[in-house]
Amino acid sequence: MKLSTFLSILAASTPVAAAPTATTSAGSAGCGKSHLLPGITQYRGLTSSGRGRNYFIHLPGNYSEDTPYPVVVGFHGSSSIGLFFEVDTGLSSDKFSANKIMVYPNGVGGAWAGANYSEASVEEDLQFVSDLLDDIRGSYCVDDSRIYATGMSIGGGFVNTIACNDVGGQFAAFAPASGSYYTDNDAAHGDCKPARSPLPLLEVHGGNDGSVHYDGGEGEGGEEPSIPTWLGWWAQRNGCDDSAKKVEDSFDGDVHHTTWNCGGEDGALQHWKVDDMGHCWASTEINFSQVAAGEGPTHISASQIIMEFFDKFTKP
């Protein structure tokens, strides 16, 4: 079944979301609204830039309508949908997000803006992110100071695009994985204008990634920077002390964890490199992206690392 057909079937039985409402000091305007079947991923639709858009949302099993919750938005890779990203990463499981609202939006044509094959423009997808957050705040009880973004491949690249634009100011921290940074490369990285500095960011990447090469070059959707170069740009944007960065090696030198102190915030910029990992979501348990990459479990769990990173930061 084609992605468009699958989403059309879901949309036919799903009401369009109500107009967004404002955030209150005690939590978002969605506080006090009850919801059926917490703990079960559900589908919602909204209209953005004149186009019908949609997303999956997973509330904690013990969801309370009067408790403001952190929100994590996860952006899928190419030729995919949010539900598949949820299953691949396991991010909705209690061991990773027992007290968080998980959101998995769907890109137009199974992708996100930035690549030469993308069907939506950067402006359209950024507007969708803003409309998505408004819808979630107006419908659910949200802690507005604790909204985060993660994603893989082109979804990770789009997380970077968000961080480089005004809408990124609505997030507390970002964590792309195996990201394809089409909108932040040698030709255009000067267009990246984060809403504040430092802007906490963590990246996970495989040194053996055959789709988004660690050393950069031509990718499936355009030219990509090397990951060290890209990290250097973020170290500069975040005002990091490059001379004091720390590198910790583990698992017989296969895993390298680099941290920077940025603007007085220790660990505001972090990078995890797994030398022998390909283009997949790092997991100590086998997942679908690892099977697709023709490899097995990795030494580290990106889901655990990313959630622990998010827990350290709130939006000022």
Image: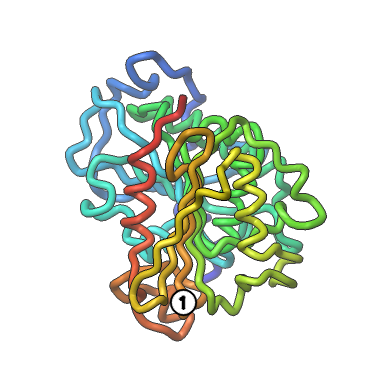
Locate residue 295: give its quadrant: bottom left
Residue occupying image coordinates x 40% and y 62%: 248
* Label 1: few (<14), some (14–19) or many (≥20) C-alpha neighbours in 10 Å: many
Q: Position of residue 278 (x, y in %)?
A: 50, 77
Can you say whether 288 is above or below 187 in the image?
below
Question: Is residue 147 left or right of 109 when viewed as pictured?
Answer: left
Q: Residue furthest left?
A: 62
Residue occupying image coordinates x 73% and y 71%: 217
Question: Is residue 50 left or right of 223 when viewed as pictured?
Answer: left
How many numbered marks, from 0 up? 1
| Of residues 302 and 133, the one drawn nearer to the viewer in this rendering | 302
| Of residues 47 and 157, the one drawn nearer to the viewer in this rendering | 157
Q: Position of residue 147 (x, y in %)?
A: 43, 35
- Amino acid type of disc 1? Met
The chosen color scheme is rainbow
Q: Report whether residue 45 is seen.
A: no
Can you say whether 97 is above or below 221 in the image?
above
Q: Report whether residue 161 is seen.
A: yes
Question: Is residue 89 left or right of 196 when viewed as pictured?
Answer: left
Residue occupying image coordinates x 34% and y 49%: 307
Q: Residue furthest top?
A: 25
Which residue in the protein does label 1 denote? Answer: 277
Can you say whether 165 is above or below 187 in the image?
above
